[in-house]
Image (cartoon, rainbow, N blue to C red):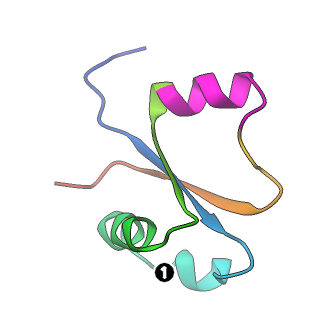
Amino acid sequence: MDNNINVRVVGLPIEQYDRVWLDTLSDRELSETALAEGDSEIYSLAEFQEALNNDKVDTENKWFYFLTDLV
């Protein structure tokens, strides 16, 4: 995996956000929403991979987005 790729993975609570609305947001807006939300999860791509492989990611209660356009 190329370590120079700047990918962030955010998980937003399903109960609080409508996925159709989230799908309309830019990567920057999704990042800002995740930062403002206390129950969101934010990972680097490597952190997400590690947590997912160790069954520590709540895939039942979060919407996940892979963000690249954060500049």
Locate residue 40, reporting x and y percent: 55, 62
Span shown in magenta:
47-56
**Crowd around label 1: few <14 · some 14–19 · many ≥20 (10 Å):** few
The kind of secondary structure element at disc 1 is: loop
Give me the residue at 48% from left, 80% from top.
Answer: 24
Q: Which residue matches tag 1? A: 24
Locate residue 69, reporting x and y percent: 28, 54
Give me the residue at 75% from left, 49% from top.
Answer: 58
Main SS, magenta region, reads: helix
Q: Is residue 62 left or right of residue 64?
A: right
Q: In which quarter of the image is the C terminus?
A: bottom left
Q: In which quarter of the image is the N terminus?
A: top left
Q: In this view, does 45 lie to the left or right of 27?
A: right
Residue 44 on the magenta segment: no
Locate residue 50, reporting x and y percent: 60, 22
Give me the residue at 50% from left, 29% from top.
Answer: 47
Residue found farthest to the front? 38
Residue found farthest to the left? 71
Q: Is residue 52 left or right of residue 43?
A: right
25 to 46, vertically: above or below: below
Residue 53 on the magenta segment: yes
Q: Is residue 38 left or right of residue 20?
A: left
Please name the amino acid that badge 1 sits on: Thr
Please identify the quarter of the rendering in which residue 11 is found. bottom right
Give me the residue at 25% from left, 22% from top.
Answer: 4
Residue found farthest to the top? 1
21 to 71, vertically: above or below: below
Locate residue 13, reporting x and y percent: 66, 69
18 to 48, vertically: above or below: below
Please identify the quarter of the rendering in which residue 26 is found. bottom left
Q: Please name whichever residue, 25 or 17, is drawn nearer the observer in this view of the structure.
A: 17
Please identify the quarter of the rendering in which residue 6 is found. top left
